[in-house]
């Protein structure tokens, strides 16, 4: 009989810590390298580039392998994880790995803006057509598939508008037809939504957000099962992607506390969102745990929790929305999210084939501050905006 698998908190502590370090260094050393030296020409000739073997800096060092092993261990069904210098480069390279000229790609209309830009510009130049679909399409995706459809990109919840997709239904249709599915799983991480287990082929994260967790690292990952991992890793090396070992080290360190941080982000965000939902200046709440959020039932069925990012409809004109945001003191105005600190952005979703659930949005990332202070800050800003 095999032992039952460890629970999430234990796996976060254990993941990726190679046996050689046990009892010695708790954390992987930061190994910086371009050149790796070989003992002989025969040894130089003999090797193929393989993850986990010293060859050249591009293939990484123990610092990188510790992080990619850890991410692989956290994703049930994964064979490996390739690292990238940003979340965006992880997404674009994964798409390049599965697509070729003449293919069509189906992309959720709620996709992260820079991903949309890549699909509409560069992918198009290389002969790949992108068609957008309603994020809530579910099994109806079957009707959009044409002979050239090669891949489907999901993002759940969607950027800014937070629609939770019916991932298992879309992936079941795709698998039947031999179409590859990829998901941007940055919001949930495998702790809240183990994407491969839900039927997705390739799971992508901006490690910049919750894995790094401290707003000081740019990094991305692509995790996949046996069927896809090798070609993902190969294209990443062929395109010359490399990641700084210092950043990989910081992401490994962030991972150890990610479970704790996510629980606190969830609790704080729900407290702030519950308060917001009662305010006259707030229209629709776009938080997956609220039944006003499109796809809420999918979240209830598929997710183990929520994180700290959500949006709400601001009732008021553009000038009032600006005054509200400018008046916040604890919420910083800035891109990205997933760090320990609270952030705010005005959000105006761009859509091609579907209506956004609401316009005039404010997106909040609720950090690890005391939620009572965040609520007081929001209350002051509503007053200032009036
Ligand atoms: C949902 C989502 N995916 C991907 C990215 C890109 O990550 P990075 O900033 O590391 O390129 C972002 C960045 O904000 C994001 O919000």
Image: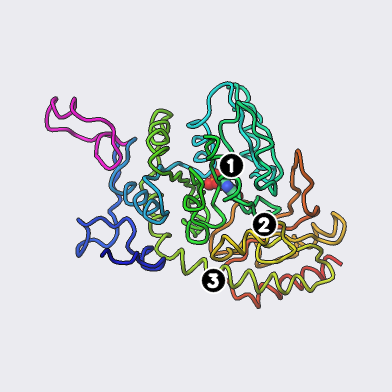
User: Residue 88, image x and y in percent?
Assistant: 54, 41
Residue 173 is labelled as: 1
How far apart are labels 1 and 3 at the CA level?
A: 36 Å
Is residue 53 shown in magenta? yes
Q: Nearer the viewer, residue 300 or 82?
A: 300
Q: Are marks 1 and 2 in contact (CB under 8 Å)?
A: no
Circle 3: is it few (<14), some (14-19), or many (20+) Cα within 10 Å?
many
The part of the image, by quadrant, that contains residue 319 is bottom right
What segment carries the magenta color? 35-57
Q: Is mark 2 on a helix, strand or loop?
A: strand
Residue at numbered disc 2? 333
Q: Which of marks 1 and 3 is nearer the N terminus?
A: 1
Residue at numbered disc 3? 264
Circle 2: is it few (<14), some (14-19), or many (20+) Cα within 10 Å?
some
Q: Do the residues labelled 3 and 2 touch (CB within 8 Å)?
A: no
Q: Which of marks 1 and 2 is nearer the N terminus?
A: 1
52 vs 279: above or below = above
Residue 136 is labelled as: none
Image side of residue 153 versus residue 223, left or right = right
User: Residue 378, image x and y in percent?
Assistant: 73, 70
User: Residue 349, image x and y in percent?
Assistant: 74, 47
40 vs 82: above or below = above
Q: Which residue is drawn at 18% across and 28% down?
A: 46
How far apart are labels 1 and 2 at the CA level?
A: 40 Å
Residue sticking out furthest to the front: 176
Q: Nearer the viewer, residue 226 or 305?
A: 226
> Would the CB of label 1 be found within 8 Å of ligand 1?
no
Q: Is mark 3 on a helix, strand or loop?
A: helix
The quadrant in which the N terminus is found is: bottom left
> Would the CB of label 2 be found within 8 Å of ligand 1?
no
């Amino acid at each position: 009989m095999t032992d039952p698998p460890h629970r999430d908190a234990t796996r976060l502590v254990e993941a990726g810590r190679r046996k050689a370090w046990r009892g010695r260094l708790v954390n992987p050393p930061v190994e910086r390298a371009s050149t790796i030296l070989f003992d002989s020409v025969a040894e130089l000739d003999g090797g193929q580039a393989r993850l986990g073997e010293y060859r050249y800096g591009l293939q990484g060092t123990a610092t990188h392998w510790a992080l990619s092993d850890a991410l692989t261990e956290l994703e049930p069904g994964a064979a490996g994880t390739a690292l990238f210098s940003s979340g965006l480069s992880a997404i674009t390279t994964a798409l390049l790995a599965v697509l070729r000229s003449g293919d069509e790609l189906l992309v959720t209309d709620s996709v992260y803006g820079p991903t949309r830009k890549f699909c509409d510009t560069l992918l198009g130049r290389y002969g790949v057509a992108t068609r957008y679909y309603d994020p809530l399409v579910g099994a109806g995706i079957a009707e959009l598939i044409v002979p050239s459809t090669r891949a489907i990109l999901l993002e759940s919840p969607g950027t800014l508008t937070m629609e939770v997709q019916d991932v298992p239904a879309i992936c079941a249709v795709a698998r039947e037809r031999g179409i590859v599915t990829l998901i941007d799983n940055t919001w949930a991480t495998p702790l809240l939504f183990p994407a491969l287990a839900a039927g997705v082929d390739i799971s992508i994260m901006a490690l910049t957000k919750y894995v790094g967790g401290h707003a000081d690292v740019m990094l991305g990952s692509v995790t996949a099962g046996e069927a896809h991992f090798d070609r993902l890793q190969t294209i990443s090396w062929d395109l010359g992607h490399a990641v700084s070992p210092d950043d990989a080290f910081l992401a490994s360190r962030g991972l150890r506390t990610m479970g704790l941080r996510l629980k606190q982000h969830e609790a704080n965000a729900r407290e702030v969102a519950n308060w917001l939902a009662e305010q006259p200046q707030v229209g629709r709440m776009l938080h997956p745990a609220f039944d006003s959020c499109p796809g809420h039932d999918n979240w209830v069925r598929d997710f183990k929790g929520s994180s700290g990012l959500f949006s709400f409809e601001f009732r008021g004109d553009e000038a009032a929305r600006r005054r509200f945001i400018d008046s916040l003191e604890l919420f910083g105005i800035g891109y990205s999210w997933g760090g320990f600190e609270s952030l705010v952005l005005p959000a105006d979703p761009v859509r091609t084939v579907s209506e956004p659930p609401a316009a005039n949005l404010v997106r909040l990332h609720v950090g690890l501050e005391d939620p009572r202070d965040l609520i007081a800050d929001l209350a002051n800003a509503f007053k200032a905006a009036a």
